[in-house]
Amino acid sequence: MKQQGHFFDLSSVTYSHDGALIATGGDDGKVKLWTVKNALCFVTFTEHTAKVTALEFLPKKGNAVLSASLDGTVRAFDLVKYRNFRTLQATKPTQFTCLAIEQGGDIVAAGSMEPYDIYLWSLRTGQLLEVLSSHEAPVSSLSFSPPSAQNTDSGSRLASSSWD
């Protein structure tokens, strides 16, 4: 997949849930989508102005890909119209290092470099729902709980890791 690759280093990668697509994010601020079948890049999103640090496809339908960046934004890209349909930001300047989407697809979480916070938004409305402030170093990874028969609050728990 190098023929149409990123100008600078590749920093993040993820498969779509059906395994048909790969999304890549680079230090060049670009998000690229590739077909697994023929290994060709078919769209490049250029809205980020700094390194892309994390990528996630929307659960279930997979009709969008979300990206987090050091530019302080989380962007949602429509995979039908190939456009940025939602930009999520913190209330103060920050650099996002990681990303997670709850199983229902509406709650988006992003961890930051500094301040050491976790931001939660509604993807549907774009509204910042909550800021979680408990880490003492950069947040490095996030994951929502998976759905299960035993867990009646599936998708509502968020695990985080940090350099602390």
Image (cartoon, rainbow, N blue to C red):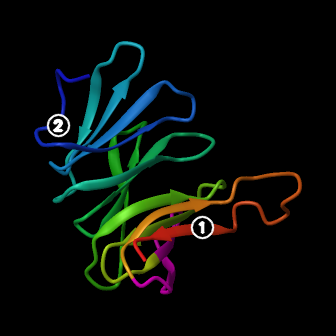
Crowd rating for badge 1 (residues with CA inside 10 Å; few <14, some 14–19, many 20+): few
Q: Is residue 129 magenta?
A: yes
The secondary structure type at the circle numbered 2 is loop
Q: Quarter-wise, where is residue 8 in the image?
A: top left
Neighbourhood count class around disc 2 (C-alpha, 10 Å): few under 14, some 14–19, many 20 upward: some
Residue 6 shown left or right of residue 11 in the figure: left
Marks 1 and 2, the one that precedes in the sequence: 2
Q: Is residue 30 left or right of residue 33?
A: left
Q: Nearer the viewer, residue 106 or 155?
A: 155
Name which residue lies at 57% across and 29% down: 18
Pick the residue in front: 122 or 157. Answer: 157
Question: Which residue in the structure is indicated by mark 1?
Answer: 159
Name which residue lies at 40% across and 61% down: 98
> Where in the figure is residue 114, as x and y percent of width and height?
30, 80
Q: Which residues are magenta?
A: 119-136
Residue carrying label 2: 6
Tag shown at residue 11:
none
**As shown in the figure, which amino acid type bears the numbered disc 1?**
Ala
How many labels sit on residues?
Answer: 2
Establish if 164 lies above or below 71: below
Q: Position of residue 130 (x, y in %)?
A: 52, 82
